[in-house]
Image (cartoon, coloured by chain):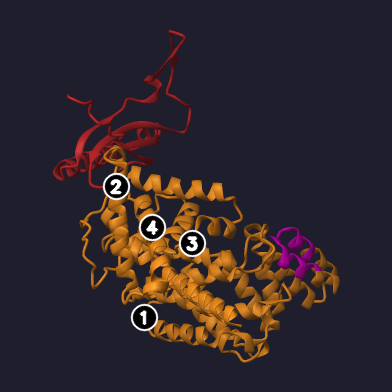
Chain colours: A orange, B red
Amino acid sequence: MTQQSSLGVALGAHRRLAETFRQEYSRVLSVLVGELREFELAEDALSDAMAAAAERWPIDGMPREPAGWLLAVARRRAIDRLRRVGTERRKAPLLIVPDATTPALSEPDDIPDERLRLLCTACHPALSQQAQVALTLRVVGGLTTIEIARAFLVSETTMGQRISRAKRKIRDAGIPYAVPDAAELPPRLAGVRAVVYLIFNEGHTATAGARLQRVELQQEAIRLASLLHERLPDDLENAGLLALLLLTAARSPARVRRGGPVPLSEQDRGLWNRDQIARGLALVANGLSRQVVGPYMLQAAIAGVHAEAPRYDATDWARIIALYDLLIGSAEDPVLRLNRAVARMELGDLGAALSDVESLTTALAGFSHFHAARAEILLRLGRTSDAVQALDTAIAQTDNQPLRHELISRRAAL
Amino acid sequence: MRYLLLIAEEEGVRSHWSQEDQQADMARWFAFTNDLQQAGAFVDGVALNESSSATTVRVQDGDTLTTDGPFAETKEIINGYYLIEVDDLDTAISWAARIPTIGAVEVRPVLELDAPEGS
């Protein structure tokens, strides 16, 4: 009994520790990278500090400022590491930091938040998008290389190489550790949002593998979007992205039943996360009151219409179609057209829905979801054998196993 | 940092332009070079003669082999460069984006080698 409860206490403490590390990791790292002008040294020094914390905190108690404690210890450990290797290693060029500060050894009361620098550097357009995603999860998300490798179904070695190549390019090409100036910032932020959205999407519908969704990647993307919105609240697309991710993630608990996917029409809406919905809807209400509404905010507004509907058949499809019209006007994208066609189908406009969908054949022929949507329209039109054929194509084109099984059982029911 | 801005363009396009357009093009290049110099970023820069005048030289087993033409027969060929000295890649990219080329620019950092001891 005593053993069990002390184990419980230890587990609780361990969880609190892991949570604190996760919260503070990128904030501390963002300061260290700026001071030490090197990713590896900063990361090594921070893991030294976390190891020390894991030893000391359970005995001494959690410090009042965990981030300050970690930063102070990491700075000392970095100096130790530099002394050990001597001047030999100083051959490698350092990161370019426009307003570099020298490390202060005193414990700071107020740690600057440099995470935006970290995010802008990791998502620099001179890196491939694949590298941007990996590096963002590593240095801003604080995920381990193994965790990232698992999330993207590649080996740890491959992911490790991808991340270290990205760091080398940053150093060798002279990518500055900086937030771009006001003129350069808007296009760069669009790139950052694209990376965050990509991370979320991989968590929402995994490209391949045994699980439909990876909630931990969704949560990580929400954390990143919150960071963007928190630091740059005037950029409405940051708010739009955060709202979209919250409103989409809110449905996650209802999207899977017994390992299989549950379509929106059959989800138990009682399982939806009301807290995330409330936060998302508040952001949308504020966003739609502005003059200019961007594509992320419009998509969030569409997700908001679903969130507000008490039942699937009570969805305001006309409003969804109107929002898609605005969205397609601002961002031409065949997937958006497909979604609008589905909304038209739900409104009962089957002929228009089918001709919309068929006009997208060239663009979306390799996309499983396209064939599944086409099958549904054909089915409602009573063209069962065409629907079966479309479902076969949809099945052949997805590597996500739960999705595959769902499509196969849908086909069997015809 | 020093960066080489390598300019690759499709050849012969300008020769189809009117004399007026060619003169305006020249003026843009001079203006760009002047801006680089004014900003203190200019180190060096040249325009190259057309690729039909190129000779590729390779030494194999002590023999010098020469072939007519550039490295590779591609649609876009290198026809000039700027060597610039700026703070970072973002600044280099913003200069590269201002080059009045009809093709593309490769931005390459110069590999800075340490001077040998005692030199």
Residue, disc 2: A82
Q: Element under label 1?
A: loop
Q: Distance between the residues labelled 2 and 4?
A: 13 Å
First along the sequence among labels 2 and 4: 4
First along the sequence among labels 2 and 3: 2
Residue, disc 1: A291
Percent x, y of residue A230: 35, 75
Which residue shows up at 65% across the image and 90% down it?
Answer: A311
Residue, disc 3: A143
Look at the picture and state if A404 lies above or below B84: below
The question of residue A393 being in magenta is answered with yes
The question of residue A385 being in magenta is answered with no
Q: Quadrant of the C terminus of chain B?
A: top left
Percent x, y of residue A369: 68, 66
Residue A363, labelled with which disc? Answer: none
Q: Distance between the residues labelled 4 and 1?
A: 49 Å
Give the foreground label among 2 and 3.
2
Drawn side of residue A410 relative to residue B41, left or right: right
Residue type highlighted by circle 2? Leu
Give the foreground label among 4 and 1.
4
Which residue shows up at 47% across the image and 70% down it?
Answer: A18
Which residue shows up at 31% across the image and 27% down it?
Answer: B48
First along the sequence among labels 4 and 1: 4
Q: Element under label 2?
A: helix
Residue, disc 4: A48
Residue type highlighted by circle 4? Asp
